[in-house]
Amino acid sequence: MANEKILIADDEARMRKLVGDFLKKEGYGVLEAADGEEALDAFYSNKDIALLILDVMMPKYSGYEVLQEIRERSAVPVIMLTAKAAEADELKGFSLGVDEYVTKPFSPKILVARVGAVLRRGGASGEGEVHACGGIVLDTASHAVTVDGMPVELSIKEFELLSFFIKNKGIALSRDTILNQVWSYDYYGDARTIDTHVKTLRSKLLDKGALIKTVWGVGYKFEVADGKEA
């Protein structure tokens, strides 16, 4: 992960320096932006940014507005910093394509660990596998998903979650299993984030979202009726 470039966008100079110092200690290159406009300028000026850390509340453009514009052009991983922990706020971010949320106040060491985990997940691409199931086609090489032939834009985490469901179709998966296998053991969060991601993923898959069943008291199961595998 050394030398990968991280953009930190936060209107608090103290926060940018604190997070930046910890990232630099781990060998990352660091860029800073004090508002949403600077964040977009930095993103467009540096084509090799590996990950963005965006504060939700920023002058000129909010973190959500920056994320929305970036997602029209790039699938670069994004971690959102927020003082809000409401489910509606998280759903808004996930629907726009955020990969992780970190709620303030937070430990800089934990944030750096999440940066590493997100980058590792993003770099762990498949070996060109194509999975077709229930009208959904998922291509690990191109990171593409179609539903009944129509392309669907998913974040990295949503793509990994759908891939895990499809590979384990018909199996009831506990939240702990999903958390460990999709988010990995070094994820510093709780299982609630799974429910939030599942809600967003279901909505993006339209009527095919119903293939992700809730198994009460357990977790979730991807289930396709007999004869509808393709």
Image: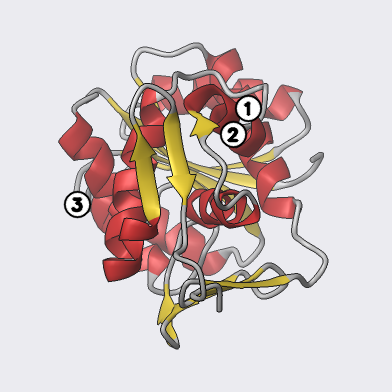
Marks 3 and 1, Cα distance to the nearest angstrom?
Answer: 38 Å
Judging depth in this view, the residue of 137 and 185 nearest the camera is: 137
| Earlier sequence position, callout 3 versus callout 1 | 3
Picture coordinates of residue 17 (x, y %)? 51, 24
Q: Residue at x 79, y 40 (%)?
A: 1
Where disc 1 sits, the SS reads helix
Contact, mark 3 vs mark 1 (Cβ under 8 Å) = no
Residue 60 is marked as 3
| Earlier sequence position, callout 2 versus callout 3 | 3
Q: Which residue is mark 2?
A: 183
Vertical comparison of 87 with 1: above or below: above
Coloring applied to the structure: secondary structure
Picture coordinates of residue 184 (x, y %)? 66, 30
Contact, mark 2 vs mark 1 (Cβ under 8 Å) = yes
Q: Give the amino acid at mark 1.
A: Asn
Picture coordinates of residue 167 (x, y %)? 65, 54
Residue 230 picture quarter: bottom right
Q: Is residue 34 visible?
A: no
Picture coordinates of residue 46 (x, y %)? 59, 63
Residue 69 picture quarter: bottom left
Query: Is 27 left, or right, of 160 in this rendering?
Result: right
Q: Is residue 127 visible?
A: yes
Where disc 2 sits, the SS reads helix
Q: Which residue is mark 1?
A: 180
